[in-house]
Image (tube, grey):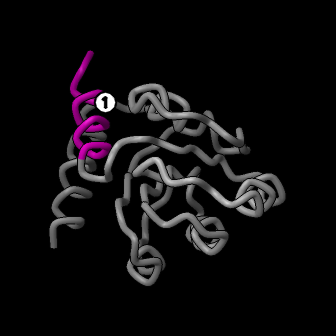
Amino acid sequence: MRENALSEALFGALRKRLPYAVLEVAQALGAEVLVKGEGCQKPIRHVVASDLMSDVLVVDEEDMLLLTSLASDQVLRTAQIVGAAGVVVVNGKPLPSSMVNVANDLRMTLVTCPLPKYDACVAVSEALKRP
């Protein structure tokens, strides 16, 4: 329930300030961009914060960014299936080298962030409120 509320809050903030690209989100989070994929400059209209890939698979939105604390190749494959512009892995988790390789193969933007997921969502929301 908490993740859905965070996603709704981010969605509301995104509607107020569009377009907002994956690289701008990374900058707002003080995050490190590991792979600049095809969608790195694509305008983001929706942010989904979830660790349950089954929940992500039912999201029917375009121009989406996925925030998750899961550090696995399957996150990238799920993001590709739903057409996400990129993936932000939060909690400062070390990523397996295979994840970077898969991101490169899929041309998916991959970002790592030291913040916990909740704090990352708040930071994105606050950044979106700025003019």
Classify the position of the C terminus by image quarter: top left
How packed mark 1 is, by other alpha carbons closer than 10 Å (few <14, some 14-19, many 20 or more), is: some
Q: Position of residue 98 (x, y in %)?
A: 77, 63
Q: Is residue 6 left or right of residue 65?
A: left
Left or right of 51 on screen, residue 75: right
**Residue 36 falls in which quadrant of the image?**
top right
Number of numbered markers: 1
Instruction: Give the x, y percent position of residue 52.
Output: 40, 77
Taking the spot 56% from the left edge, 58% from the top edge, the residue there is 84
Residue 7, given in percent of the width and then of the height, sits at 26, 57
User: Does dot 1 land on a helix, a strand or a loop?
Assistant: loop
Q: Quadrant of residue 29?
A: top left
- Residue 81 versus residue 119 in the image, above or below: below
Figure check: 65 above or below 60? above
Identify the residue shown where x is 30% and y is 40%. 14
* Residue found 24% across the figure and 19% down from its top: 130
Question: Could you say where residue 45 lies in the image, as x and y percent from the top left?
Answer: 40, 46
Provide the major secondary structure of the magenta segment.
helix
The residue nearer to you, when weighing 48 against 59, is 48
Report the front residue among 90 and 11.
90
* Magenta region, residue range: 119-131
- Quarter of the image for residue 80 reads bottom right
Q: Amino acid at mark 1?
A: Arg
